[in-house]
Amino acid sequence: MPEGDTVARQCRILDDALAGAVLTACDLRVPRAATTDLVGWTVREVRPRGKHLLMRLDPPGPGAAPLTLHTHLMMDGIWHVDGRPLRSSDTSAGPRPDHTIRIALTARHHDGQETRAIAYDVKQVRLVRTADEDTLVGQLGPDLLDPAWAADPGLRERAVSNLGGEPERPLGLALLDQHLLAGIGNIYRSELCFLARLHPAAPVRAVGDLGQIVDIAHRLLRLNSDRAVRVTTGGMIGRDGDLWVYGRGGRPCRRCRTRIVRGELGEPRLEGAEARVLWFCPRCQAGP
Ligand SMILES: [Zn+2]
């Protein structure tokens, strides 16, 4: 499951490649949009919202309202631009078979250059009026990568109060819940629980300072949205030193040398999270 930083990075590359260009071919291979023709529409911008990608389109002439083409990468989705995968540490960047294409766009720039953007295996492909975007993403909590984050303390306050709103819920589940705050996936929830020195099943109320966790999450996502390789350790440890616990089952904790344990923690109301693996240090992270 791509994390918010990966989605932000893919959006930035798509935006660089497509903004201002006019669609000359458009193939939406999903039943509800298959007959939609977006030829002549201009890509205004591509923006992330949590883990959702929003491609905003302006109509060819007056009379039509701007539209948003929405996608979610879910487990395996990835965009390619001019044949190059938008690499990430979450998803395989290898070649994808044609039958997994969900969206194929060609766009022409003012100088006549054409760009081809293809989305493989993306989910939740939907087209709505831009004015109605909230019907798709309005339920999300504050976005940790919202450009307004630094200027608007209300975003952080709302994230902290949302997290604190269910004090008995396991921290490892609350952090994943995009309705509370948007952008954290399975990797960051393991890393953040480690940094908070709490077992993922420990209740939210055990966190001394929720604001501090939100601040760390924001900082890590922002730093990593500029990088192809995700780092939560500060990158000071050297080879294989990118993450504290995620994916490190059986290997020594970087803090206390105890072996890292692989566990599972999920709940049905979280997307695809019925039994989601996680990793923790049984010594550093206090139990529930
Ligand atoms: Zn440890």
Image (cartoon, rainbow, N blue to C red):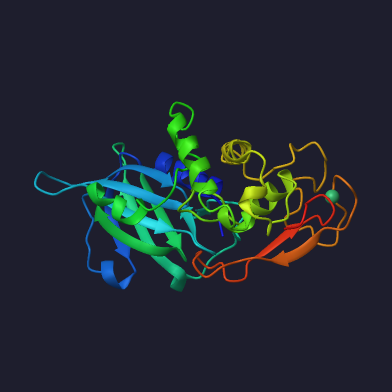
Q: Residue at x 33, y 56 (%)?
A: 136
**Image quarter hosting the N terminus:** bottom right
Q: Is residue 89 visible?
A: no
Q: Which residue corresponds to the image point at 45% horizontal and 53% vertical from the top-left?
A: 179
Seen in the image, is 242 located left or right of residue 85? right
Using residue 191 as the reference point, say whether residue 148 is left or right of it. Answer: left
Horizontal and vertical percent for residue 135?
Answer: 29, 55
Image coordinates of residue 101 in percent, x first then y, are 43, 67
Give the left or right position of residue 252, taking residue 57 as reference. right
Q: Residue at x 46, y 48 (%)?
A: 50
Q: Is residue 39 above or below residue 221?
A: below
Residue placed at 24% from the left, 51% from the top? 132
Residue 77 position (above or below residue 160): below
Q: Is residue 225 left or right of residue 198?
A: left
Which image quarter: residue 227?
top right
Nearer the observer, 61 or 160: 160
The percent position of residue 48, horizontal first and vertical second, equals 43, 46
Q: Position of residue 22 (x, y in %)?
A: 27, 46
Extreme residue toward the left, this view: 63
Q: How many marks?
A: 0
**In which quadrant of the rendered view does residue 43 lie?**
top left
Most foreground residue, 25 or 36: 36
Q: Is residue 38 among the parts visible in the rendering?
A: yes
Q: Residue furthest top?
A: 151
View extreme (right): residue: 257
Q: Nearer the viewer, residue 245 or 287?
A: 287
Quarter the C terminus occupies = bottom right
